[in-house]
Image: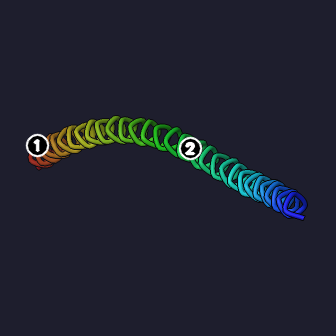
Amino acid sequence: LAVRHTDDQAENFYALLAELKKGLHSVEVVFESMSKASESRLSEAQLARKRAEEELVSIREEHTQAEAKIDKLEQKLAKKREEMDDLRESYDKLEDRLKREREARKKAAE
């Protein structure tokens, strides 16, 4: 009877050990699954960050190009304004000369 009792205890011990191994394996599978899911989310987040950084670089380059274009246009506008001022000045001089010539003709006609 004592041998049988020892055999039952050993059998129960090994059955308990087998259940414990199954439980540990289940926990290991769950942790591995969670780890893979976390790694996947991390990888997606890193990829999204990389894309955002690339887009930011692209936007900055476009901004720089736009600023350069604006500077060129502002310089061109300033040059055109100077040309307009010069033309106004020439026009005013021609008007004065024409006026003087008219006055001179008028005096000569009198």
Q: Look at mark 2 in the image and give the residue it sits on.
A: 46
Q: Secondary structure at mark 2?
A: helix
Q: Residues within 10 Å of mark 1 (few under 14, many from 20)?
A: few
Q: Residues within 10 Å of mark 2 (few under 14, many from 20)?
A: few
| Residue type, mark 2 in image | Gln
User: In the image, residue 44 lies at what x, y percent?
Assistant: 64, 47
Q: Look at mark 1 in the image and give the residue it sits on.
A: 104
- Looking at the rendered image, the disc whose residue lies closer to the viewer, 2 or 1, is 2
Query: In the displayed structure, does residue 51 sit left or right of residue 13?
Result: left
Front residue of 63 and 46: 46
User: In the image, residue 7 lies at what x, y percent?
Assistant: 87, 57
User: In the image, residue 19 lies at what x, y percent?
Assistant: 82, 59
Query: In the displayed structure, does residue 57 sit left or right of residue 19?
Result: left
Front residue of 81 and 101: 81
Which residue is at 44% across, 36% downward?
Answer: 61
Front residue of 65 and 31: 31
Quadrant the N terminus occupies: bottom right
| Residue type, mark 1 in image | Ala
Q: Secondary structure at mark 1?
A: helix
Q: Residue furthest front?
A: 1
